[in-house]
Amino acid sequence: MLIGIAPVISPALLDVLFRMGHGDEWVLADAFFPGDSWNSRVIRADGIRIPALLDGILQLINLDSYVPHPVMMMQAAPGDTLDPSVELAYRKVIDLRGPGTAPIERIERFAFYERTRKAYGVVMTGETVTYENIIPKKGVIPVVIEKI
């Protein structure tokens, strides 16, 4: 454990967050998402819910403020319905850690998979509700230089 880092952030995830550049995207995926089929960098976070993980991550990095939609989720397929509590839970975390962040963009399922292929990596979580997958985009982290 490290002071100031949420316990849901594993050493492997911390390493990935450190190595990502601004504008890089990552996928927080549910337990059934085909992460290994779409990306070669997969981190396991089994048993951890996405809102807790998102909160831990957004304590360390910020979302991209230079794009219209720094967060994306998958659209429901025709005939499916979304559970609105999922997006509300994510929005609560996003609004806490990045007030003023643009609304979450919904993208078509196969467009989501293509974004996953290009993403920096995939974090496989313990979520089991459908359409819980989310793609945040890392922003520029302001550097503060202190005088000694």
Image (tube, rainbow, N blue to C red):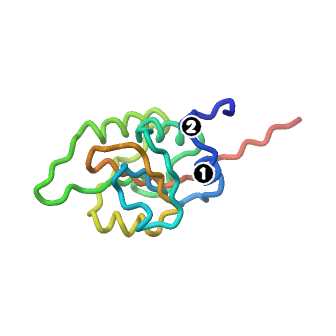
| Mark 2–mark 1 distance (CA, rounded to whole Å) | 11 Å
Helix, strand or loop at mark 2: loop
Q: Quadrant of residue 77?
A: bottom left
Q: Which mark is residue 87?
A: none
Task: State the image coordinates of residue 14 (x, y, percent, origin top left).
Answer: 62, 47
Q: Nearer the viewer, residue 29 or 97?
A: 29
Residue with the mark numbered 2: 59
Q: Which kind of residue does numbered mark 1 sit on? A: Leu
Q: How many labels were placed on the picture?
A: 2
Q: Is residue 40 left or right of residue 35?
A: right
Does 107 sit above or below residue 90?
below
In what quadrant of the picture does the N terminus appear?
Answer: top right
Q: Which kind of residue does numbered mark 2 sit on? A: Gln
Q: Residue at x 50, y 50 (%)?
A: 44
Comes first in the chain, label 2 or label 1:
1
In what quadrant of the picture does the C terminus appear?
Answer: top right
Please identify the residue farthest to the top as the structure is shown: 3
Task: State the image coordinates of residue 16 (x, y, percent, origin top left).
Answer: 61, 54
Task: State the image coordinates of residue 27 (x, y, percent, origin top left).
Answer: 44, 55
Helix, strand or loop at mark 1: helix
Label 1: few (<14), some (14–19) or many (≥20) C-alpha neighbours in 10 Å = some
Q: Quadrant of residue 9?
A: top right
Residue with the mark numbered 1: 17
